Image (tube, rainbow, N blue to C red):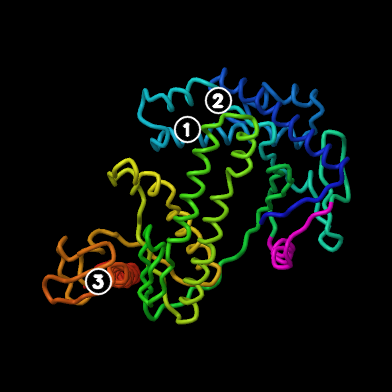
Amino acid sequence: MQVKLMPDAGQALALERTLHVVNEAANWVSAVAFERGVPHVYELRKHTYGELKSRDLGAQAAQHVIKKVRDAYTTLNANIRAGNLGRPGSRRRVKAETKPIVFRPEAAQPYDDRCLSWQYDAGTVSVWTTGGRMKNVRFACSAGALKTLQAHRQGESDLVRRDGVFYLIATCEVPEAERFEPGRFIGVDLGIVAIATTSTGYQAAGRGLNRHRRRQLELRRKLQKKRTRSAKRLLKKRSRREKRHAANQNHIIAKTIVTEAERTSSGIALENLTGIRQRVRLRKPQRVTLHSWAFAQLADFITYKAQRAGVPVVFVDPAYTSQQCCECGHIDSKNRVSQSVFCCQNCGVVAHADRNASRNIARKGEAVWIAGRESRVPATP
């Protein structure tokens, strides 16, 4: 849950200085960890804890800095093993493996309940800073977010400064609703021209989002050509605008799909598109569109919203869903006449291509659900 802080001038200065101090300390710990082969947290603590305490860091703050550095290296190693940074010997991977991790001056800093306390009724927090405990820092959030914070906030919260504004990212553990038995499944076909098409008839067109992305791309190109300080400042200011716009659209689409599934007591079937960027080969002008396609984010939004509503979600193999006829089951690449038209070469059915694919996904989802529900253990003779 993201909460906006509204500190006064003195409080903002103290928070800014705190982030700079802890991240400068994190860079020093990162250099020590890199020199010593990235030891475990307990061993790394032996080499760094005393120095961190001498830098005016409290005991808990020092522990969080050490753990933050160790977690960063754990994530880096996981990305290297997964191949997310390229093949062995590639420029990006070599750069990541031969240099210590560096933290931005305003990178997020975790706080636990010993360093941060919430006063929900007053709308304030008490937070540790390098200048001492700072009380009565006001925060703002929606009524629903405040209710969630009061009922479900647990664990750590991250202090973040983004575009000159301070935020607290609080961890909330919301229990899942009891999952019901679906009467049917709603298939969701994800795409670029149509962001999402369901087997019930709902279609989220991607025309507006794609037009917005093209405008942002052209603006970035113009600003990058200028290479002036003002252009760089504007690029930095607009860097996350496109992501926020796409995330907002995905939230709206996900909420619409989950609400429909909850209302009709249906499950949701999604395509398992893991690794699609590595599998698909496109011409250069098409790569920008594919790599800016936030289908994984949309699937994540649908999944967590469905869990909160108790709606079952299954992932199916997307193979041949766009080439198979939803009426007779005939598979042929010629069935897909164009991007939007499907015409079965066997039975002659004509349908919208995405709608046809969503119905195939729905049928696969029901099969996956039944297969997972039925016992595979042989009967005892």
Q: CA distance from mark 3 to mark 1?
A: 47 Å
Q: CA distance from mark 2 to mark 3?
A: 53 Å
Q: Looking at the picture, how far across and down is residue 118, in whole percent?
A: 80, 55
Boundaries of the magenta span: 138-152
Residue located 47% across and 61% down the image: 208
- Does dot 1 land on a helix, a strand or a loop? helix
Queried whether the magenta region covers residue 140, the answer comes back as: yes
Which residue in the protein does label 2 denote? Answer: 38
Q: CA distance from mark 2 to mark 1?
A: 10 Å
Q: Nearer the viewer, mark 2 or mark 1?
A: 1
* Mark linked to residue 77: 1
Nearer to us in this view, 172 or 290: 290
Residue at far left of view: 346
Queried whether the magenta region covers residue 247, the answer comes back as: no
Whether residues under marks 2 and 1 lie with C-beta atoms below 8 angstroms apart, the answer is yes
Q: Looking at the picture, how far across and down is residue 285, in whole percent?
A: 34, 43
Q: Residue 124's quadrant in the figure?
A: bottom right
Residue located 28% across and 66% down the image: 340
> What amino acid does circle 3 point to?
Thr
> Which secondary structure type mostly characterizes the magenta part of the structure?
helix
Mark 1 surroundings: few (<14), some (14-19) or many (≥20) residues within 10 A: some
Which residue in the protein does label 3 denote? Answer: 380
Q: Residue 69's quadrant in the figure?
A: top right
> What amino acid does circle 2 point to?
Val
Residue at far top of view: 35
> What amino acid does circle 1 point to?
Asn
Q: Nearer the viewer, mark 2 or mark 3?
A: 2
* Mark linked to residue 322: none
